[in-house]
Image (spheres, coloured by chain):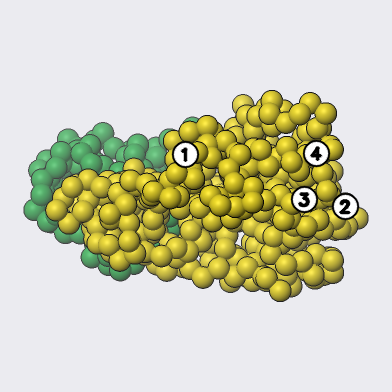
């Protein structure tokens, strides 16, 4: 199940591990990425914290985690190929994985695909 | 509400992402994206709408001498249709604006200035030039830049007069029936042309240029990364009212004859300060930086020496598409300004090694004949 935040992150839950990335819309807005500053493994964050920075040719953008928990993986492929986020923002261009503390609570406040689409259309 | 250039509809037609810039609604990028636009301009030819820039003429008996009182250049060294990069200065030697002035005839000049400064520049000329000298704003003219190694190939199909030009020279010529003034110049470091064209003819001309296979549209995003690679200053970032040409490493823009010992020494605003600084040096200087890794050091990034002392700040920075690394322009203390000096750029609390580098970062390809 994939859910979306108002900050244009997506999160996909499998068991208690959530994969986080940015949406296609966000990737298009950012433009060509040149660098992804990702969080350290084992660092803990609350939903809404700044956990990463994506640098595009034009600007730097903070990335917030949509869910609380401990970072258990980062996408190493972005080190050499940050544009993977532009090419496949909602697939191979994921950013980090979080071991989440309490799945149900956190996910309720996020949007599903159709709600996110309506949010974009507003 | 932002002002629109005549090409606004064209920009929207070809997928521009528009942003406010200097009071204008301008294309940041098109569908190719900043990186591809940048690389295309270095490889083939890019078309830029720079109609937001100010264009005006200065004409009247004695205009040459009167302009020499305002500009640190030797106007009489310019032949007809030759142009020169110069600076408007305040009395402290600070830079009010940078501009290109072209001598059309003996006492008839064509001037192009930055969009954000144009009203104040025109007022300045009105105030300080004798009243009989006429200043005419060419606000019914658009300005295009066609830049890149294939610019000349494209221009060859439109005007043989234009392709005969060498760098920093211009000519009146007809392009698709429109009376244009074309110069061999630009702000990308590439060979290319700037085309001053009546607004009534710019849409047809731009569409025609974009029809050629070599030409892609380029927005302000790539214009910025191209000029940064070329080591060219952006007014308001790499220089302003509080920086002098000496600090900005623009001494080359002060004509030899206007310097100490020259035939027309001094006599321009801020001359005492500037000539003094040329002799005695300054405490800070504009330099180029190459930064290790992939993190762009953007405007405002703090710079430290190896001991951790703050010695300067980045004024323009980004990730260069051509070299695939972060580069920047910065002001640093003069004792850290030698090429090869090792510094640290502090970005979000982390230090990244930065080396003072020669500019331009990529070779210039101006056509000098």
Residue lying at 48% horizontally and 68% vertically, measured from the top left: B362
Q: Which residue is mark 4?
A: B62
Q: Are the residues under marks 4 and 2 on the same chain? A: yes
In the figure, residue A34 lies in which quadrant? bottom left
Marks 1/4: CA distance?
27 Å
How far across and down, in percent of the image, does residue A28 sit?
46, 51
Q: Are the residues under marks 3 and 2 on the same chain? A: yes
Name the front one of labels 3 and 1.
Answer: 1
Question: Counting residues from the N terminus, which is met first, the one under dot 3 or under dot 2?
Answer: 3
Residue lying at 20% horizontally and 42% vertically, measured from the top left: A67
Q: Which residue is mark 3?
A: B103
Chain coloured yellow here: B
Q: Indicate the chain on which mark 3 is placed.
A: B
Marks 4/2: CA distance?
31 Å
Q: Are the residues under marks 3 and 1 on the same chain? A: yes
Marks 3/2: CA distance?
21 Å
Q: Which residue is mark 2?
A: B178
Chain coloured green here: A
Residue B275 falls left or right of residue A80: right
């Amino acid at each position: 199940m994939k859910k979306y935040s108002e900050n244009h992150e997506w999160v996909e839950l499998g068991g208690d591990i959530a994969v986080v990335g940015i949406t296609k819309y966000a990737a298009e807005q950012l433009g060509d990425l040149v660098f992804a500053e990702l969080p350290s493994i084992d660092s803990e964050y609350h939903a809404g914290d700044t956990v990463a920075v994506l640098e595009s040719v034009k600007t730097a953008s903070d990335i917030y985690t949509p869910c609380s928990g401990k970072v258990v993986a980062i996408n190493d492929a972005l080190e050499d190929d940050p544009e993977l986020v532009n090419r496949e923002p909602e697939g191979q261009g994921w950013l980090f994985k979080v071991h989440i503390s309490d799945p149900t609570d956190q996910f309720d406040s996020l949007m599903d695909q159709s709600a996110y689409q309506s949010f974009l259309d507003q | 509400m932002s002002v629109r250039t005549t090409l606004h509809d064209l920009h929207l037609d070809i997928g521009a992402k528009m942003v406010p810039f200097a009071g204008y609604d301008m294309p940041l990028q098109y569908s190719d994206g900043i990186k591809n636009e940048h690389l295309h301009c270095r490889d083939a030819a890019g078309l830029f709408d720079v109609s937001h820039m100010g264009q005006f003429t200065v004409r009247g008996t004695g205009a040459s001498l009167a302009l020499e009182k305002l500009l640190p250049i030797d106007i009489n060294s310019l032949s007809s249709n030759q142009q020169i990069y110069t600076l408007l200065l305040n009395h402290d030697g600070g830079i009010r604006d940078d501009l290109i002035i072209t001598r059309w005839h003996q006492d008839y000049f064509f001037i192009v200035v930055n969009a954000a400064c144009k009203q104040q520049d025109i007022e300045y000329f009105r105030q300080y030039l004798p009243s009989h000298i006429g200043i005419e704003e060419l606000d019914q003219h658009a300005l295009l830049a066609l830049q890149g190694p294939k610019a000349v190939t494209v221009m060859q199909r439109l005007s043989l007069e234009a392709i005969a030009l060498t760098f920093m020279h211009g000519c009146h010529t007809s392009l698709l029936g429109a009376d244009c003034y074309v110069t061999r110049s630009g702000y990308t470091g590439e060979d290319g042309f700037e085309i001053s064209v009546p607004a009534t003819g710019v849409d047809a001309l731009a569409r025609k240029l974009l029809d050629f296979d070599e030409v892609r549209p380029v927005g302000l995003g790539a214009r910025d990364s191209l000029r940064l690679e070329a080591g060219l200053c952006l007014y308001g970032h790499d220089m302003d009212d509080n920086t002098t040409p000496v600090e900005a490493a623009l001494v080359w823009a002060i004509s030899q004859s206007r310097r100490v010992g020259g035939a027309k020494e001094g006599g321009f605003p801020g001359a005492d300060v500037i000539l003094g600084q040329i002799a005695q040096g300054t405490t800070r200087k504009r330099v180029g930086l190459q930064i290790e890794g992939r993190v762009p050091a953007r405007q405002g990034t703090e710079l430290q020496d190896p001991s951790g002392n703050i010695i300067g700040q980045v004024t323009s920075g980004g990730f260069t598409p051509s070299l695939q690394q972060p580069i920047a322009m910065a002001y640093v203390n003069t004792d850290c300004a030698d090429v090869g000096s090792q510094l640290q750029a502090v970005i979000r609390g982390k230090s990244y090694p930065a080396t003072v580098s020669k500019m331009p970062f990529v070779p210039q390809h101006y056509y000098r004949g």
